[in-house]
Amino acid sequence: MQNDQTVQTGTPARPRQLPAWIIMLAVVLLVGFLVVIGLGLKNTMQGPITPGDPVPAFSLTSFDGTVYQSSDLKGKVVLINFWASWCKPCEQEAADLEAAWQYYQPGGKVVFLGVDWVDTAPEAKTYLDKFNITYINGPDLRTAISQIFRIKGVPETYILDQNGRLAKIIDESGNQLNPKIGPFTSVAEIQNTIDRLLK
């Protein structure tokens, strides 16, 4: 008795390939991701911005929606204070910063910018109301501004000279002062730092 066997002939089926446009899209996305990672690593390896360095252009959108461009502030001394509503040391300097702003505001030669870092708008606005802060303040959207200065935390304060460079300030002993990390301890400390640039 003969067994019926089915004999299959022909070539084996090829595995299905992805369409060329999907492969290209994946390659473009991968390259874009690597570029973003590379730029982030480059900024990290550069270290903090130092006195005398020109500060790259940036914009700050205030809590009321007004956009301020750093390039429009040239010719003025600019104090940039990074803060957050959850930051207790920030509270220690809040009243002094506002008092210093009230002192300089009438002269029009100094601008204060408050940059709210890793915070939420409702808490930030409550903080500004609590300390009666009237100078320009806005959130650091996508941490774009803090990445320029490569801040480590809050509070940190940077002062730009009239040419848009991070101020090179020399103290009485002849030592160069670094950007202020930590809270100011008095209005006089803020004024002494700014007044050197107004001479």
Image (cartoon, rainbow, N blue to C red):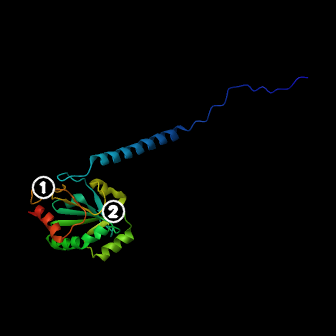
Residue, far top? 1
Judge whether 40 appears above or below 146 on screen: above
Kindly check if marks 1 and 2 are in contact, taking CB atoms under 8 A apart as contact: no
Q: Secondary structure at mark 1?
A: loop
Identify whether 48 is placed above or below 65: above
**Residue 104 image point, x, y percent:** 16, 70
Report, in whole angstroms, how far the alpha carbon at label 1 lies from the one at label 2.
30 Å
- Tell me which residue sits at (80%, 27%) in the image: 6
Residue hosting label 2: 117
Indicate the amino acid at tag 1. Asn
**Badge 1: residue crowd in 10 Å (few <14, some 14–19, many ≥20):** few
Identify the residue at horizontal 17%, vertical 71% (top origin).
187
Residue 199's place in the image compared with 57, above or below, is below
Q: Position of residue 116 (x, y in %)?
A: 32, 65
| Front residue of 10 and 177 | 177
Q: Looking at the image, which residue is at 35% across and 60% down?
A: 141
User: Looking at the image, which is closer to me, 130 or 13?
Assistant: 130
Q: Secondary structure at mark 2?
A: loop
Please state the horizontal and vertical placement of residue 168, each as a whole percent of the image: 15, 55
Look at mark 1 in the image and give the residue it sits on.
Answer: 175
- Identified by mark 2, the residue type is Trp
Q: Is residue 68 left or right of residue 77?
A: right
